[in-house]
Amino acid sequence: MSMPFGYASPEQIMRDKADYARKGIARGRSVVVLQYEHGILFVAPNPSRALHKISEIYDRIGFAAVGRYNEFEALRLAGIRYADINGYTYDRGDVTARGLANVYAQNLGQIFTESVKSFEVEIVVAEVGETPESDQIYRLTFDGSVFDEHGTSAMGGQAEAVSGRLKERYREGMPLAEALSAALFALTEPGGDQPPATQLEVAVLDRNRPHRKFQRLTGARLTALLAEGEAAAPAAEGEQEGPAEPDKPAESGKPAESGKPAAGKTGNGKTANGRSAKGKDDKAPPTAPEGEIDTGSGD
């Protein structure tokens, strides 16, 4: 039986769709999501003031995306409708990031398998809980796969390199300024300059805020956080510097010549090493000066 003209196996079709979607997502700029002391932080380089990569879905739920804007904007609006309908029909507490991630996974998976063109998007749905242990971060890829992230998540652009740099700086319970500094360090190429505040899109899900937890950080507050993070960075780097040079051996510690005493005065009133006998004052100075030492840690 001859194969029809233009036939391609299902495996080849799925592979081509996946490659097409990955290339489109990689052309965008990365987005970083990470937990901090009081919630979840979203950071994205975005020079546009009209098109947002980071948005609010519901009271405790945030949304971040990379890829083709019109496609992830359609997903965002669908998520808002889902949350509003379920919150009104049942209870606002019944709207969760896990339920929303399942809905997104079904839609993306159906589009990937049935449509000629897959969505060129990757999204994160995050929910802040009463405690850091109850925070939820879900990352969804173009084919509907769901990943339960813990602590940090990076997507778009050079996601693997960004994720590696982020893990170098990340630690649990970071203050907001330190978390923002770690995110910018991850988003900046080695040797490159960090984007200015006017080209950053930053938002938080703050568990301490009443009712609606989502808040954008802009203007003077964002500038102050960036300055605070820059001031803390040199101190942190100073604490990681190598140990001080080892003490140099004192000249008086040299072995005595054979047949001569190792210590004490000689006949001309000098010690065996040729120095005047002055007691303790003749010892080599310590490596660090006496008194308090500025280690650069800011303590």
Image: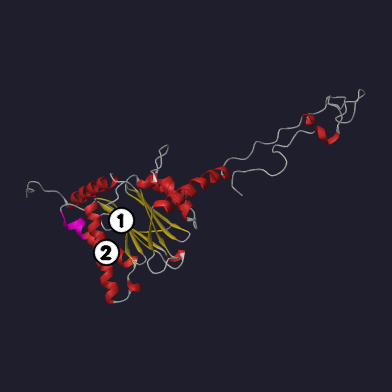
Q: Residue furthest front?
A: 220
> Where residue 106 appears, x then y in whole percent?
24, 63
Of the pair 31 and 99, the residue shown nearer to us: 31
Circle 1 Cα neighbour tier, 10 Å, few/some/many (<14 / 14–19 / ≥20): many
Tell me if 161 is positioned left or right of 282 in this view: left
| Residue 23, quarter of picture | top left
Of the pair 285 and 102, the residue shown nearer to us: 285
Residue 122 forms part of the magenta stretch: no
Q: Residue furthest right?
A: 267
In this rendering, is residue 121 above or below 133? above
User: Mark 1 is on which residue type?
Assistant: Ile
> Where residue 80 appears, x then y in whole percent?
27, 65
Boundaries of the magenta span: 110-115
From the image, give the main secondary structure of the stretch colored magenta.
helix
Residue located 30% across and 65% down the image: 100
Instruction: Kindly identify which residue carries mark 1.
Output: 123
Q: CA distance from mark 1 to mark 2?
A: 12 Å
> Where residue 54 appears, x then y in whole percent?
32, 55
Residue located 41% across and 39% down the image: 193
Residue located 29% across and 48% down the image: 48
| Residue 127, quarter of picture | bottom left
Q: Secondary structure at mark 1?
A: strand
Q: Secondary structure at mark 2?
A: helix
In this rendering, is residue 287 above or below 177? above
Circle 2 Cα neighbour tier, 10 Å, few/some/many (<14 / 14–19 / ≥20): many
**Which labelled disc corresponds to residue 79?**
2
Of the pair 228 and 120, the residue shown nearer to us: 228
Tell me, yes or no, if residue 136 can be seen here: yes
User: Mark 2 is on which residue type?
Assistant: Gly
Tell me if 258 is positioned left or right of 292 in this view: right
